[in-house]
Amino acid sequence: MTPAELLDRWIAAFNAGDADALAALYHDDAVNHQVANAPVEGREAIRAMFAAEFAAAEMVCIPVNRIADGEWAAMEWQDPMGFRGCGFFHVVDGHIRHQRGYWDRLSFERLYAGTG
């Protein structure tokens, strides 16, 4: 699977709220580092992270810009409420080895937790 194909599958699984399908896209020892949080290491921990996030808030990823080059895919995204961020996916052997996401925690909490 190419990085561009993997990103398409990642977006579909994210928008379906399917933590199991998302986890299947990662290497066993992958790292997901949403820079507003501590890195999450390992496929099962990544699955648990997504499951907890989907239970806490209804999230939608609308890709604004997507780029793929070599082993990397990246996207700028937004959600229906105007929350924005970007993500970078290092894809090795058809699975995500490392993911980094950049978004503003305070804006997220104001929109989804009613805090801040």
Image (tube, rainbow, N blue to C red):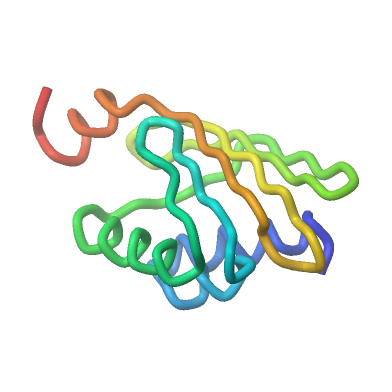
Residue in front for this viewpoint, 4 or 71 = 71
Q: Position of residue 23 (x, y in %)?
A: 51, 70
Instruction: Identify the residue at image location x=22%, y=63%.
Output: 55
Classify residue 58 by image quadrant: bottom left
- Image position, residue 111 (x, y; %): 21, 33
Q: Residue at position x 71%, y 63% from top?
A: 6
Q: For this view, does 98 lie left or right of residue 94?
A: left
Q: Position of residue 109 (x, y in %)?
A: 20, 33
Is 101 on the left-hand or right-hand side of 106? right
Residue ID at (47%, 36%): 78
Quadrant in which the C terminus appears = top left
In the current view of this chain or complex, which residue is farthest to the left? 115
The N terminus sits in image quarter:
bottom right
Residue displayed at 26% across by 61% down: 52
Q: How many marks?
A: 0
Which corner quadrant of the image does residue 51 belong to? bottom left
Residue 53, position as x, y percentages in the image: 29, 56
